[in-house]
Image (cartoon, rainbow, N blue to C red):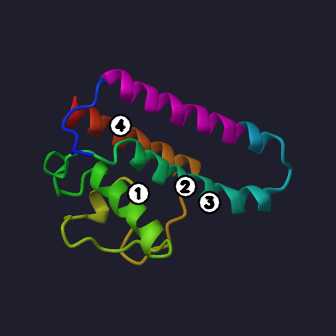
């Protein structure tokens, strides 16, 4: 597929709605369990996978429009590549200038990626805002 330079707002809105529905399903599931250890084990697995899903909605975005300045699109790309290719430890990407202090998640290279619900929601909001800013 060719790279995408523009996403229709209705597509972005539909992706937001899917994320919202998936988070709602997670919350409903969590309400049904009394096991704090089960929740603590499940939460990072679920939200790490949600980050991969988030990236997949816009996987064909034009890299030149995305930039390389450590923005939320870059951060999601690095997080997903690290989850898939580096066993869940944040890896450096030589093509992206990530600054942990300015990032959404504040992860350092080598940190284990274990997204909480709050982490994912912050990351998703910043990601969607950047998509709308650059690809609308």
Query: Which comes sooner in the sequence, label 2 or label 4?
Result: 2
Quarter of the rendering containing residue 86 = bottom left
Name the residue: 17% across, 57% down. Answer: 68
Residue at disc 3, secondary structure = helix
Q: Residues within 10 Å of mark 4 (few under 14, many from 20)?
A: some
Dot 2 and dot 4 residues touching (CB under 8 Å): no
Q: In front: mark 2 or mark 4? A: 2
Name the residue carrying label 2: 49
The x, y position of residue 11, in whole percent, is 37, 27
Dot 2 and dot 3 residues touching (CB under 8 Å): yes
Quarter of the rendering containing residue 20 = top right
For the residues labelled 4 and 1, the Cα–Cα distance comes to: 15 Å
Q: In front: mark 4 or mark 1? A: 4
Q: Main secondary structure of the magenta part?
A: helix
Span shown in magenta: 9-27
Residue at disc 1, secondary structure = loop
Name the residue carrying label 1: 105
For the residues labelled 1 and 3, the Cα–Cα distance comes to: 16 Å
Query: Which comes sooner in the sequence, label 1 or label 3?
Result: 3
- Label placed on residue 45: 3
Front-most of residues 88 and 59: 59
For the C terminus, the quadrant is top left
Q: Residues within 10 Å of mark 2 (few under 14, many from 20)?
A: some
Q: Residues within 10 Å of mark 3 (few under 14, many from 20)?
A: some
Dot 4 and dot 1 residues touching (CB under 8 Å): no
Name the residue carrying label 4: 128
Query: Which comes sooner in the sequence, label 3 or label 4?
Result: 3
Name the residue: 22% across, 45% down. Answer: 2
């Amino acid at each position: 597929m060719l790279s995408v330079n523009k996403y229709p707002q209705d597509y972005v809105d539909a992706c937001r709605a899917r994320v919202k529905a998936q988070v709602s399903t997670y919350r409903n599931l969590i309400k049904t369990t009394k096991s704090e250890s089960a929740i603590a084990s499940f939460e990072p697995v679920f939200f790490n996978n949600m980050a991969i899903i988030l990236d997949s909605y816009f996987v064909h975005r034009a890299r030149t429009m995305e930039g390389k300045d450590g923005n939320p699109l870059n951060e999601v790309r690095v997080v997903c590549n690290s989850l898939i290719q580096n066993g869940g430890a944040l890896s450096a990407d030589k093509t992206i200038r990530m600054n942990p202090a300015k990032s959404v998640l504040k992860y350092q290279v080598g940190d284990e990626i274990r997204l909480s619900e709050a982490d994912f929601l912050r990351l998703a909001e910043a990601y969607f805002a950047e998509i709308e800013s650059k690809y609308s």
